[in-house]
Amino acid sequence: MPLRDEDKGQTIISEAALRLALAEKEININSLLIELGHMATDNCHDERLNKIFVARTWLREFITPVPAEQHALYLQILASLNE
């Protein structure tokens, strides 16, 4: 997302970050996603809901899933500890 493109969520993400900062909460991708979810439950119009949806979709691209192989290795280590 180009940082200058307000239609892609820059303003909405900034608002969510400001709310978190004012509440003295940690600001990261997960907390931004949660805050945007809270903002979506406020009384707001369709255009604002759309901007929140676009921003949340964009932020989700930065969540790195843990590969299944790491889970399997972790389980193997746990199993060996019980032997």
Image: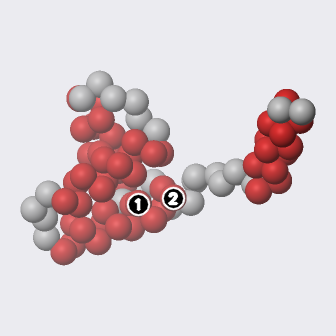
Q: Amino acid at mark 2?
A: Arg
Considering every residue shown, the one lying at the far front of the view is: 83
Work out whether residue 12 can be spotted. Answer: no
Work out whether residue 20 can be spotted. Answer: yes
- Return the x and y of residue 44 as percentages of the image width and height: 13, 64
Q: Which sits in the foreground, 33 or 1?
A: 33
Considering every residue shown, the one lying at the far bottom of the view is: 46
Residue at the spot 38% in from the left edge and 46% down from the top edge: 32
Q: Secondary structure at mark 1?
A: helix
How many labels sit on residues?
Answer: 2
Q: Amino acid at mark 1?
A: Arg
Residue at the spot 31% in from the left edge and 62% down from the top edge: 52
Q: Residues within 10 Å of mark 1 (few under 14, many from 20)?
A: many
Q: Which sits in the foreground, 26 or 47?
A: 26
Q: Which residue is mark 1?
A: 56
Looking at the image, is 47 positioned above or below residue 37?
below
Q: Which sits in the foreground, 72 or 23?
A: 72
- Marks 1,2: beta carbons within 8 A: yes
Quadrant of residue 43 within the rendered picture: bottom left
Residue at the spot 40% in from the left edge and 30% down from the top edge: 26
- Return the x and y of residue 8 as percentages of the image width and height: 39, 65
Q: How far apart are the alpha carbons under marks 1 and 2? A: 6 Å
- Return the x and y of residue 42 as percentages of the image width and height: 14, 57
Whether residue 30 sits left or right of residue 53 in the image: it is right
Where, quadrant-wise, is the C terminus in this rendering?
A: top right
Looking at the image, is 47 positioned above or below residue 36?
below
Residue 82's label in the rendered image is: none
Considering every residue shown, the one lying at the far left of the view is: 43
Q: Which residue is mark 2?
A: 60
Q: Residues within 10 Å of mark 2 (few under 14, many from 20)?
A: few
Whether residue 5 sits left or right of residue 75 in the image: it is left
Residue at the spot 35% in from the left edge and 49% down from the top edge: 34
